[in-house]
Amino acid sequence: MTDSSVFYRSRKPYPTAVRGEGVYLYDGAGRRWLDGSSGALVANIGHGRAEVAEAMARQARTLPFVHGSQFTSDVLEEYAARLTAFLGLPGFRFWAVSGGSEANESAIKLARQYHVERGEPERYKVITRVPSYHGASLGALAASGMGARRAMYAPLMNEAAWPKMPKPDPRLSGEEDAERLRAVLEEAGPDTVAAFLCEPVVGASDAALAPNPGYHARIAEICREYGVLFIADEVMSGMGRCGAPLAVRLGGDVTPDIVVLGKGLAAGYAPLAGLAASPEIYRTVMEGSGAFQHGFTYAGHPVSVAAGLSVLEIVEREELPGRARGQGERLLAGLRDLQSRHPAVLEVRGHGLLLGVVLGDPRTGEACAAPGLAGRVAAAAWERGLITYPGTGAVDGTRGDHLLLGPPLSITDAEVDEMLAALDGALRAAG
């Protein structure tokens, strides 16, 4: 496409997508792909839902835009009330933005302002994990523990502000695993830490890795003990994808101080993300300076929020969290069968329809000496009409190949079987 004016993400050739329907995407020549990763775990309700487009059009005809520093809107008020109810977060306040990176930036800045308003301006550090991924903007990237994506921009980051904790260890009980946070807090200086930020089920950096039950409840206890906010990054794992409204509650009844949301909020129909903040945080900010010292032009955009409201209605009406559990069990069982027949598949794991396939050297049972296997499998799957989400670097920032799988929550039994057949062929072809 040398005559194009588009700045592409890479130099590979790009087909032109022209239509989406259900779990499928089509190019101009009529070729079809099963969207086995929902783009980047976004298209939770599937493609081509006319009722969402109609809701957006209705909103655009009446109120297409207002600035959040000047107005609220009926659609934002309704959506915030219904969303926090769906998530089981009574009294929480919803702050709307356009994407997950913006949402995590907002959560980090809100945690900082909360402590300043309480008279603790020395609290500015945010503890995160290695590996992890919280977004592409500079603050969210600094918070991330994903070497390949951070390396180029490391000189722009204040590394001292982002202490890192080891990733979940499935060999430990959830409580023992969480206790490792205490050592990181003590080393960082607990009076300088504003928040602990984690993905309840890891996404792009270590496909579908999750701690054992009890982890998040103990994390919440430790955070309260040290006066640190607990931020759950549910951009990828939330909104039913893992089989529940919030993945942080899969192992017990846990309520973080801030929940970050994105991707599945509007399911790709419009840019929409945000955070839900506890009543205590909202009250502290409003009784302090009286305003969150932060904002984006398109925050709370009425047309995007209308898309989110329509998507939420579909998620509730069609009971998609439950569907994610059921179809996830079917897909996971099929992946375990593939593991038994393909030695390069070292592990399969995940919750609901956020699943991971860990790849490696069958001779050693460990990561390959150099990355590349995940990319080869993904390319072979693409040729067979299946889109996956490959990744590397989970072991040491370079090594550690994996595939992330996350089809629309509306996927059928036959479509799950189609995914498995294509992946079977791709694993054979990639060797």
Image (tube, grey):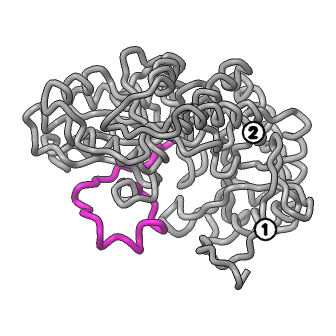
Picture quadrant where residue 323 is located: top right
Q: Amino acid at mark 2?
A: Gly
Q: In the picture, which quadrant includes the C terminus? A: bottom right
Q: Position of residue 93 (x, y in %)?
A: 37, 25
Q: Residue at x 73, y 55 (%)?
A: 388
| Alpha-carbon span between mark 1 and mark 2 | 20 Å
Residue at the extreme left: 119
| Residue 91 seen from this side | yes
Q: Residue at x 61, y 26 (%)?
A: 312
- Residue that extends furthest to the bottom in the rendered view of this protein: 2
Is residue 287 highlighted in magenta?
Answer: no
Name the residue that disc number 1 marks: 15
Q: Which residues are magenta?
A: 143-169
Tag of residue 79? none
Return the residue nearer the eye: 63 or 366. 63
Labels 1 & 2 near each other (Cβ < 8 A): no
- The residue that label 2 is drawn on is 46
Task: Name the amino acid, label 1.
Answer: Pro
Report the residue at 48% width, 45% height from top.
98
Residue 369 shows in the view: no
User: Quick one: 407 or 183, which is closer to the camera?
Assistant: 407
Image-quadrant location for residue 176: top left
Specify the quadrant of the image occupied by residue 380.
Answer: bottom right
- Label 1 vs 2, first from the N-terminus: 1
